[in-house]
Structure formats: structure tokens, C-alpha cells
Image (cartoon, rainbow, N blue to C red):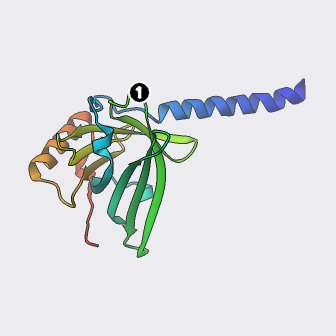
Amino acid sequence: MKVFQKIAVPVSLGIIGLLILNSCSVGIPEGATAVSNFNSEKYLGKWYEIARFDYKFEKNMDNVTAEYSQNPDGSIRVQNRGYNYVKKEWKESVGEARFVNDKTEARLKVSFFKPFWAGYNVIDIDDDYQYALVSGNNVKYLWILSRTKEIPENIKQRFLTKAKKIGYQTDALIWVKHNL
């Protein structure tokens, strides 16, 4: 019985910890709302990263793009690519995204290292699906995306205003160069 307890208790605690970590990591920031009536088909394709915070996994990266495509099982393939201008090399990461609720709500969870998932929430998008404001699960993660390497000033200001209202420190955004 003691041997069973020595194994079962740590394993159970580990599983519970993973479940809690997993469930907490796919949230949406307080005050943010995911886009409803979302059309995932229109969202697929290539996006240029226009702005982001200085994340460890994107440190020293310019020319960053994300490409989304449909997997046969209904999930979305996520292919991120960027150029590390310090190491002078291209980096790529491929992951998977799944809808948290209904496919028409732009709340997804994304994983590049299963079983760990993170929130990916489209919180603003233009009618033509050319520009998107994407949040993570809290106010530490934010991206401004565009189908082209630039974004119109009015869309930029709209996204920055919305992000500030939610609580993002938009002055800390890195404006990504696209020069290659």
C-alpha cells in the first residue's frame, strides 16, 4: 500500500497540476472579447507580424510571418517563421491551434509543445480579414498582424486604442521590420 501511495500521489498531483496549467493557459484577458461570427476560412493564409511585445521565443526576430492552414482533423496548422538578425539565421516553429468553443468564436488554443497550450484570441479584425489584433491569455501577449508588410494608420490607432483599454502597455510594443 505504501508503494502505491508513493507512486499514485505524485502522479495524481502531477496530472492535476497539468490540468490546472492547461486550463489556465487558454484564457482571454479581462476586458477582452474574442471576435464573434468569425470566419476561420477567411483567416487562413499568410500574415505578417507588424507589432508584438519582446517575447523570449521571438527575441531578435524580424521578418516574422505566420501561416495558417486547415489540418484534415479540423484543427489549424500554425507555421511561424522569422529571421534572427543577431544569429543571421531563419527560425521556424510549427504548431497546432484548436477552437476553445464554437468555430465562429475567435478563441483558440495553440500548442507548439504539447501538451502545453496557450490562448490565441482574435480580439479585433477588419471586415475583409486584412488586419488582426490578437491577444494571448493575459496582457503580456499581444500581436498586430497584417496581410501585407504595412498597416494603415487608422487601423493601427484603432488596435492600439483597443489594446490600451484592455490594459496593454502599448508603448512597449516592438514594431517588426520586414526588409528581406
Residue at the far bottom in the pictured view: 88
Residue 35 appears in the figure: yes
47 up-or-down from 33: above or below: below
Please provide percent x and percent y for residue 115: 58, 41
Q: Which residue lies furthest to the left in this view?
A: 154
User: Which quadrant holds residue 8?
Assistant: top right
167 lies left or right of 154: right
Q: Looking at the image, which is closer to me, 87 or 129? A: 129
Q: Position of residue 73 (x, y in %)?
A: 50, 40
Picture quarter with the N terminus: top right
Residue at 48% across / 31% down in the picture? 24
What residue is shown at x 32% (from left), y 52% (from top)?
45
Q: Position of residue 18 (x, y in %)?
A: 60, 34
Q: Could you tell me the amino acid type at mark 1?
A: Asn
Which image quadrant: the C terminus? bottom left
Q: Residue 102, located in which quarter of the rendered image?
A: top left
Residue most toward the top?
1
Question: In this view of the protein, which residue sits in the foreground, 26 or 138?
Answer: 26
Secondary structure under the numbered disc 1 in the rendered image: loop
Total marks shown come to 1
Rendering coords of residue 29 (x, y %): 34, 33
83 versus 9 height, above or below: below
Asked whether, in this view, residue 69 is left or right of residue 33, the answer is right
Residue under the point 56% across and 30% down: 20
Left or right for 20, reference 84:
right
Q: Name which residue lies at 39% across and 49% down.
A: 69
Indicate left or right for 38 with 82 as reference. left
Circle 1 packing at 10 Å, graded few (<14), some (14-19), many (20+), is few
Find disc 1 in the rendering and name its residue: 101
